[in-house]
Amino acid sequence: MVKLAEWQGKVVFRKYGVPLPRGEVARSPAEAESLVRSGKVPLPCVVKAQVLAGGRGKGGAVRFASSPEEVREAASAILGLDFKGEKVRELLLEEKLAIGRELYVAMTLDRAQRLPILITSAQGGVEIESVPDAEIDRQPVDPFPGLTGYEKRRAAKTLGLAGGPARTLEKVLDSLWKAFQQEDAELVEINPLAVVGDGLVALDSKVIIEDDAAFRHPEYAEVRDDRTELEEIAREKEIAFVQLDGNIGVIANGAGLTMATLDVLTEFGGRPGVFLDLGGTDDPKKVTEAFLLMCRAKPTAVFLNIFGGITRCDTVAKGLVEAMHQVPPAERFPLVARIRGNNEAEGIEILRAAGVTAVPDLKSSAQAAVEAARGRP
Ligand code: GDP
Ligand code: MN
């Protein structure tokens, strides 16, 4: 998932004409101070941590300042904060507006209805999860005509807007819809959309770009910094590789089997620490490469679960054994394999000859992997 930081989401909003406060990004207290001294950000201002987690307002990661000294102070306090596990490295400084009501507006995908939906609530400014369902309006949107006049008027009514502000809302919604479609977003959220005099201003942004559309948006390639170093390397090699917080490594093929393997391990008391999906490949070179990457994640034990359909079990086994020989003895770990399907007997033979525990049955092999991990630090 490509989750944009608030300021990056606001760059998107600006492109589509969503009204925003004046603001600038700072990466040090000195830079923050000079932004207000030079007048690039007017005082009083808001100093906001640029982290992906929400709830910054309540968590002390959004502060107000009315002098350059206060800005520097707020910036020092927020930069370097560990906010819900994320280190704050960037700040957004914005003019502080005198705001009236805070509204909630978002466009997202409803997977059950297989349609985009427009979500609105007059109870903005707090996380939408904490708003009672009766206070939230959801309208499915037919993607071909796009947002209709009716849907926009119903949104205005839900939000308690009439006259000029209602017309402004319609423009904001048109911009939001365009951003949602043209950026291939899975979520564009404004919370709060603040009433400022007769106008509306997006005080916050949350934008998530659909991963499968990433190839259409090279401009977001740099944004994906929630990946670990190894995940980044894997992406370059086009290996599906995800790090979790357990200690057992999982190598499987196909997303379904990979997820099921994680579940089975968990069921037997194991904690998956990293998983790797070989997909449809049995190219021994690719398997070797993937395995070596897995080693770098330092799993306590590795569970290999392969179903050989198009993939041939023996070539996967060959690639694996090849890779194992490249790992220094001190860094080796127990490997348990469950390998079934095309050329299964040959695959098991190759693995056993290399000292791998190879069991065709899923339950006992998963238990063996959990056992192998348990005995070790
Ligand atoms: P979040 O808590 O992480 O979602 O951060 P937000 O960007 O939504 O900010 C939290 C709250 O700060 C908002 O709901 C507003 O109440 C307040 N806030 C942010 N900017 C301004 C501003 O310009 N003026 C005023 N008065 N309040 C603001
Ligand atoms: Mn918010």
Image: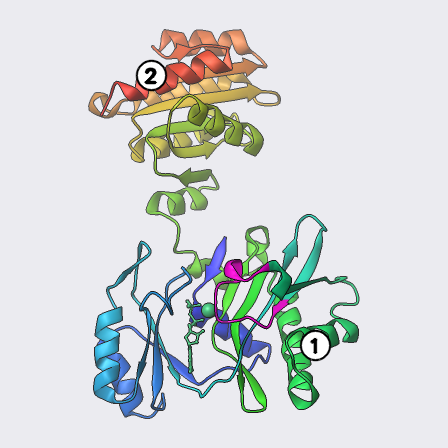
Q: Measuring 40% from the left and 85% from the top, which residue is drawn there?
A: 96
Magenta span of residues: 120-132
Q: Measuring 25% from the left and 75% from the top, which residue is drawn there?
A: 75
- Above or below: residue 230 compared with residue 190: above
| For residue 181, side relative to residue 19 (left or right) | right
Of residues 174 and 227, the one nearer the viewer is 174
For label 1, the residue is 157
Q: Measuring 61% from the left and 23% from the top, which residue is drawn there?
A: 310
The mark found on residue 167 in the picture is none
- For label 2, the crowd category at 10 Å Cα-Cα, with few meaning under 14, some 14 to 19 and many 20 or more, is some
> For the residue marked with disc 1, what is the amino acid?
Lys
* Figure quadrant of residue 190: bottom right
- Sequence-wise, the earlier of marks 1 and 2 is 1
Counting from the top left corner in percent of width and height, residue 361 is at 50, 11
Mark in the foreground, 1 or 2: 1
Of residues 106 and 137, the one nearer the viewer is 137
Counting from the top left corner in percent of width and height, residue 246 is at 34, 33
Whether residue 253 can be seen here: yes
Q: Is residue 2 magenta?
A: no
Whether residues under marks 1 and 2 lie with C-beta atoms below 8 angstroms apart, the answer is no
| For residue 215, side relative to residue 304 (left or right) | right
